[in-house]
Amino acid sequence: MDAADLRIFEAVARLGGMNRAATELNTVQSNVTARVRLLEDELRTPLFHRHSRGVTLTPAGHRLLPYAERLAQLLADARRAATDDGTPRGPLVIGSLETTAALRLSPLLSRYAAAWPEVDLVLRTGTTSEMVEQVAARRLEGAMVCGPIDHPELQGEVMFREELVLATTRAVRSLDELIGKGDLKIVVLRAGCSYRQRLEDVLARRGAVGARLLEFGTIEAILGCVAAGLGATLLPRALITTSRYADRIAVHALPVAEAHVETLFIRRRDSYASSALSAFLEQVRPPVLQAAE
């Protein structure tokens, strides 16, 4: 068993078929099939169940897969390290909360792109749970998420601090009035959004449980619905006060313990930090942290 065998095994497992793996690896299906069978013979155990739709992993295959994935990443990191001469260039795929992208990243990314035009930057947005899963799975080099994060394979660095506030239509004068009305509705992003969970916790501490959820796909849609009086939401103050709905939304402050939240940049502890990533972190890192280094 060598690195080439595990690379083929990982591709077949990830793509679910010998032919699809052969296409990705730029070889023929017969070669992939033969190498997989030789690996199974060497290990004396089947790694895949074969069926008409492709292949699925056996229990032994499931046990082997994490090692194959780690080896593939190690080889990729080794290749990047060898070719990285210190000048930021090439692909950089990172993630962010939609709120952070809208509120904080636009000017920073503009300056970054101007400074390092050879970097092919890709920014993907999602919820904190989605970002954590994608960074852990090595599909993102890093991501901006809502802290705190407790994951054994990830490390986090504080990049921004936000004040969260409850947002309602201007007809609602206080949080107590909102809760006292009954038939409470909250306007939120999909499950996995950290602000959504914090809003439910804020309401639960005040005895308001079982609020009806109005789920939308974008921050813009949420702000529009809040302004129209469809429900309440929880977002950073700066995002609300700079939105086009600011004059139609009432902002209700929360106690410090509930309001203050840190935005972290997370990445895997064992991944290679490319020059492109290092330059990005220097661009977005708060000045006080840069001065401390």
Image: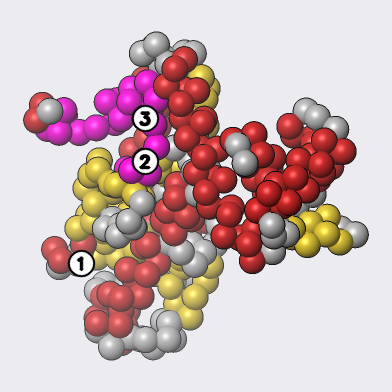
Q: Is residue 183 left or right of residue 258?
A: right
Q: Amino acid at mark 1?
A: Glu
Q: Is residue 118 above or below residue 198?
A: above
Q: Is residue 254 left or right of residue 229?
A: left
- Which of marks 1 and 3 precedes in the sequence? 1
Residue 178 seen anywhere in this rendered image of the structure: yes
Question: Which residue, given by chain and number where applicable, does mark 3 sit on?
Answer: 273
Identify which residue is drawn at 68% across, 49% down. 42
Q: Say what secondary structure mark 1 lies in.
A: helix
Identify which residue is drawn at 82% across, 35% down. 31
- Looking at the image, do the residues carrying marks 2 and 3 touch, with CB atoms under 8 Å apart? no
Identify which residue is drawn at 30% across, 30% down. 281
Image quarter where the C terminus lies is top left
Residue 94 image offset from top left, x and y in percent = 45, 37
Per the rendered image, the range of residues in magenta is 264-290
- Which of marks 2 and 1 precedes in the sequence? 1
Q: CA distance from mark 1 to mark 2?
A: 33 Å
- Camera-nearest label, 1 or 2: 2
Question: Which residue, given by chain and number where applicable, does mark 1 sit on?
Answer: 258
Identify which residue is drawn at 75% across, 45% down. 38
